[in-house]
Image (cartoon, rainbow, N blue to C red):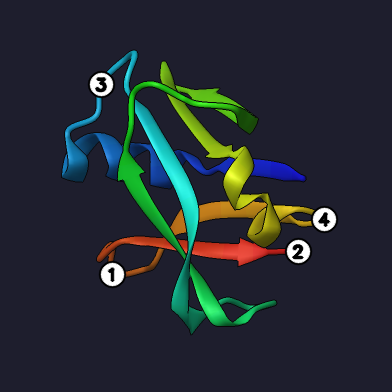
Amino acid sequence: MQLTITDQASKWFQTEMGVTVGAGIRFYGKTYGKTNVHKGFSVALMRDDVPKEPIIMVEKDGIRYYVNERDEWLFSDYHLTVTVNDSEVGPEYNFS
């Protein structure tokens, strides 16, 4: 598993969610929706500054982005790239 946060996404999290150095963003799986590789499941996120059993964590601009062990089922075997759509409405998730 790999996790990439684009520069554009990092700026969005800082501007729209108000995250600052030392903050954390946790990605997790939720029912309903879809991704480019999943049907019936999609990605959600929440502000969570205290990672618990992360299986992957990357730091960008002093902010920790991660996935916890209990959500490995959605992310394992994939490279997740988080970016922002052209209208900057919110994050987009691309699995490869």
Q: Secondary structure at mark 4?
A: loop
Give neighbour class at mark 4: few <14, some 14-19, many 20+ (Cα, 10 Å): few
Which circle's residue, 2 or 4, is located before the other in the chain? Answer: 4
Question: Which labelled disc corresponds to residue 87?
Answer: 1
Q: CA distance from mark 3 to mark 4?
A: 30 Å
Q: CA distance from mark 1 to mark 3?
A: 23 Å
Q: Nearer the viewer, mark 2 or mark 4?
A: 4
Q: Amino acid at mark 4?
A: Asp
Which circle's residue, 1 or 4, is located before the other in the chain? Answer: 4
Residue at label 3? Answer: 20
Give neighbour class at mark 2: few <14, some 14-19, many 20+ (Cα, 10 Å): few
Q: Amino acid at mark 2?
A: Ser
Decide: marks 3, 4 in contact (CB < 8 A)?
no
Which circle's residue, 2 or 1, is located before the other in the chain? Answer: 1
Which circle's residue, 3 or 4, is located before the other in the chain? Answer: 3
Question: Which labelled disc corresponds to residue 77?
Answer: 4
Q: Image quadrant of residue 2?
A: top right
Q: CA distance from mark 2 to mark 1?
A: 23 Å
State the residue at coordinates (33%, 23%): 49
Q: Image quadrant of residue 62?
A: top left
